[in-house]
Each structure stands twice: as C-alpha cells, then as structure tokens.
Image (spheres, rainbow, N blue to C red):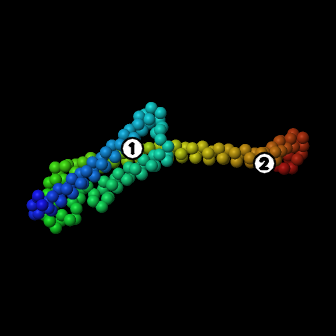
Amino acid sequence: MALPENTLLARYAYSQALSRSTALSALEVSLDEYLTSMAQLPHSLMTTGKPGMGRKQLIKKLGELMKFRQGLNLNRENFSDVPDFYWTEPELERHFDSMSNALDVKERTRSVNEKITYAAEAQSVLRQLLTESSTHSMELVIIALIAVEVVIALIREGPELWAKLVGTSEEKHTNPEKELVVT
C-alpha cells in the first residue's frame, strides 16, 4: 500500500468530510434552482396582484421546500452534527472538524437554512393569499345560494303574502265596520 496504514482512519475522516461537503453542494445547487423557479412570484404579485401559480402548483412547491429542509437537517447524517463514529476517537474528530471547517460546512448549512426560511416565509404569504381568495369565492357562492333561496321562497310564498297584504288594505277601504270590530 502506498499510504501508511496508520493514516487510514484520518483519510477516512477527510473523505467523509469531503463527501458531506459534496452532498451539501448538491443540495445548494438544487435549492438555487428552486429559488430561481420561484423568483417570478414577487414580481407577479407586484404587477398583477396574483401569484401567477395555481393552488396545486404552490402546494407542490411547498412540498419541495420541505424536502430541502428535511434533507438538510433531518437525514441520517445531517450537516451540522459530527458523526457518532468520531465521538470515541478524539483525534479523528479533530481531523473531521478541521476538514469540515476548511470546507465551511457549518456556514454553508446556516446559509442554506436561511434561504429555506426565506422561501418558506414567501410560501406562507402565498398560501395565505390563495386561502383568502378561495374564502372570498366561497363567500360569494354562499351569498348567491342565499339569494336563490330567497327567490324560491318568494315564488312559492309570494302570491299568498301579496294576497294577505293587498287583501287586508282592500278590506279596510271597503268595509269600515269590520275595522271597528277588529280593533
């Protein structure tokens, strides 16, 4: 073997730090592509007052954003913790930490989390707008249904109510004696 055997674990620590950095780079690229796909939303809101994206598309984008957060913080080897393997080997942990620090893994992880937080806040605003617009639509439907119900009631009960209303006033004009008896 060309490399000394006593450096095997140190090389492993370095390779794992490089692997982690590479995985973080892939996540950063994917997140940048996601943010680029969402970049038109603020402009669309500003110019048209509408998000320019349907409810289903927005929910899919929210799921994609949650996937990024999960991949960054909740996978089996998240980017902010030292792997368990190194806890029993302080020398290896030092190698791993020095390589992770050289590759700015913690700072990059924090940066990705901030981007995800910004995107989540933007998604929350868009979700509220969609909820508000669907609530407004439902209110209009309810008002229309009440109006239809009133019209149906007037058609059904209207002639009888009209006869009572008109009949009572005609009786007062034609028969004043009944009026005295009633009061």
Query: Which is more N-terminal, label 1 or label 2?
Result: 1
Give the number of the disc on residue 122. 1
The percent position of residue 118, horizontal first and vertical second, equals 34, 45
Residue drawn at x 25%, y 50% is 22
Indicate the amino acid at tag 1: Ala
Check disc 2 and report the residue beneath it.
156
Q: Is 52 displayed left or right of 176 in the figure?
A: left
Please rate how many residues cluster around mark 2, counting C-alpha atoms within 10 Å: few if below 14, some from 14 to 19, many from 20.
few
Question: Of residues 114 and 108, which is closer to you in this image?
Answer: 108
The percent position of residue 91, horizontal first and vertical second, equals 11, 62
Q: Can residue 7 be seen in the rendering of this structure? A: no
Pair 2/1: label in front = 1
Question: Of residues 81 and 8, which is closer to you in this image?
Answer: 8
Tag 1 secondary structure: helix
- Vertical position of residue 92 compared to residue 183: above or below: below
Q: Quadrant of the N terminus?
A: bottom left
Indicate the amino acid at tag 2: Arg
Residue drawn at x 33%, y 43% is 32
Residue drawn at x 11%, y 63% is 5
Q: Do the residues labelled 2 and 1 touch (CB within 8 Å)?
A: no
Tag 2 secondary structure: helix
The percent position of residue 150, horizontal first and vertical second, equals 71, 46
Question: Disc 2 and disc 1: Cα gap in Å?
Answer: 51 Å
